[in-house]
Structure formats: C-alpha cells, structure tokens
Image: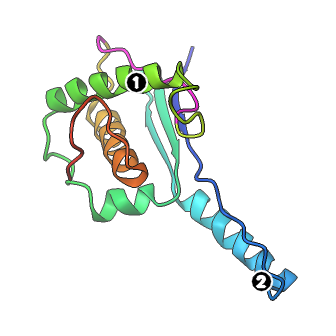
Amino acid sequence: MKKVIYILLLCAFVFNCNTSKTIASDKSKSEKELAQVVNDTVTIANDELEYEIIIIEPGFNTWLLTTARPEGFYSQQYLENRNNIYVIEWNQRVLQPQRFNPNLYEMQIDYQPGIDYGYEVNYKLFNYFIYFQLNYKQRLAGFVPRI
C-alpha cells in the first residue's frame, strides 16, 4: 500500500477586469500560468519506503533552487524535529477553518515521527514550510522562518 503525503496548495490568481486585453493575450497568459504550475510541481518519492510528497506551488521549485540552503546544510535529525513540529501545527490549522484561512491550510499532512522518510523528503518538506511561511506571512509553531 503506497502512502502519499500531499501538499496541494495553489495560489489564487487575481483576475482584473480590463477590456483592453485581447482573447489571445488571455490565452497565452493562461498557458504561461499552467507552465509555471507544471514547472513548480515538486515530487519527492522514496520507493523503498513507499512514500511520496507532491508539492504544487508556483514559485517553490525556483525558490528551492535559488534561495534555500543547500542539501546537507541541516542534519536529518534537525529536519525531522522541525518537520514534526511544523506538521503538528499545520494539521491543527487545517482542523480550524473558522480561525485559519482554509485556502492556505487545505488538507492534513500524514507525517509520522517514527518513520525514517530519508533526507530528501525531510529536506524538501522542511523547505516548503519555510517557503510557505515567508511567502504567505505565516508563522508555524513560533519559529521565525529563516533561510
């Protein structure tokens, strides 16, 4: 049985009413947005453990490659500890849609601290939490998100 950890967050695109736009330019803009989403879909899979994370977030892949600390900067234990704290807070916010924006916290993350997901899964999940906090001006679990 393959367990999947999904983080499916799509930024809401703001559409302005503007009569000077042509249909062709709207179509090319939609194609560019779709290409950005496709290019910013990050899949992290560990076939050995049968776990997978899919992150769909425009801008995350670029941020991960250009801004985030390189792989190996943090120890796996550090990443696991932070991810556990972030996931607990995230899941609590998902369960409180009247208090926290349900468009930001759409679904729970099935992350269990007793399972060794491997370095890559922990690294990308941790960096997604940092990106999310910086991008949406959120603070999970009281930590100031730093790069």
Q: Nearer the viewer, residue 133 or 41?
A: 133
Whether residue 138 sits left or right of residue 8 in the image: it is: left
* Secondary structure beneath label 2: helix
Mark 2 vs mark 1, CA separation in Å:
46 Å
What residue is pinned by disc 1? 48
Q: Which residues are magenta?
A: 105-114
- The amino acid type, in three-letter code, at marker 1 is Glu
Q: Which mark is residue 25?
A: 2
Q: Quadrant of residue 74?
A: top left
- Say which quadrant the N terminus sits in: top right
Residue at image point 72% right, 66% down = 15
Q: Is residue 41 magenta?
A: no
- Which of the two labelled residues, at mark 2 and mark 1, occupies the earlier sequence position? 2
Q: Position of residue 34 (x, y in %)?
A: 67, 63
Residue at the top extreme of this rendering = 114
Residue at image position (31%, 45%) is 130
Q: Principal SS element in the magenta part?
A: loop
Identify the residue at the far bottom of this view: 20
Residue at image coords 56%, 43%: 9
Q: Residues within 10 Å of mark 2 (few under 14, many from 20)?
A: few
Dividing the picture into quadrants, the one containing residue 60 is bottom left
Residue type, numbered disc 2: Ser
Left or right for 91, reference 68: right
**Rendered view: 78 above or below 28:** above
